[in-house]
Amino acid sequence: MKDKGQLLIEVVLGLGLLVVILGILASFTSILFRSQRYQSFNQGIAISGFEKYRNALISIAQTDWSLLDNLTSTESYYVLATSTSWQIATGTEKIIIGNESYEFSFKISNYGTSTIKFVTTTAKYLDLIFEDYFLLPKLNVSY
């Protein structure tokens, strides 16, 4: 009778140990799949897109602040370069590099004052969305 009780305790401890090991393996597998999901995302493209938008909006803030004042905070916009300046259009900019397609856009709103804008720049790749935030001051440049 004593042996049966000891065997039962050994089985319960063995099952408990198996559950712990399976839990660790499941966590590791989950982390591995999540990291592979981000592996195909090219961070360099997102960072250069964020820099492009920041530089373009700073340039616009220096030359034509009223263009920024006319934007609504609910609409998505993107920037495009002309031969002489930056322009703002409604919607998203689609950039295709190889077989990868990225979408960039920004939203803008006042930051408690009419001389500072709060900008959210978004990079989208597949179902992944990355955002960059910055404050854009009204710059008075005199030449």
Image: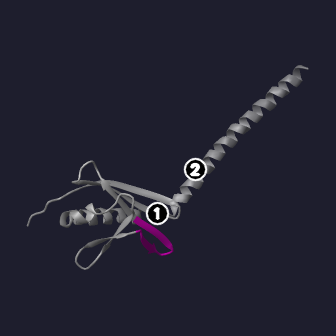
Residue for point 34% across, 54% down: 133
**Label number found at residue 124:** 1
**Label 2 sits on residue:** 31
Circle 2: element type: helix
Q: Quadrant of the C terminus?
A: bottom left
The residues colored magenta run: 91-104
Q: Who is closer to the viewer here, 5 or 82?
A: 82
Q: Please, what is the three-letter code of the amino acid marked with disc 1?
A: Lys
Residue 67, located in which quarter of the rendered image? bottom left
Residue for point 22% across, 77% down: 84
**Please, which residue is most extreme toward the left here?**
143
**Please, which residue is most extreme toward the bottom here?**
83
Taking 103 as reference, is 36 above or below it?
above
Residue for point 51% across, 74% down: 99
Place of residue 117 in the rendered image (x, y in percent of width and height, measured from the top left): 27, 55
Question: How was this image coloured?
Answer: one colour
Q: Residues within 10 Å of mark 2 (few under 14, many from 20)?
A: few
Q: Please, what is the three-letter code of the amino acid marked with disc 2?
A: Ile
Circle 1: element type: strand
Left of 44 or right of it: where is 126?
right
Q: Who is closer to the viewer here, 40 or 52?
A: 52
Residue 70, located in which quarter of the rendered image? bottom left
Left of 6 or right of it: where is 124?
left
Q: Assign the magenta stretch its main secondary structure.
A: strand
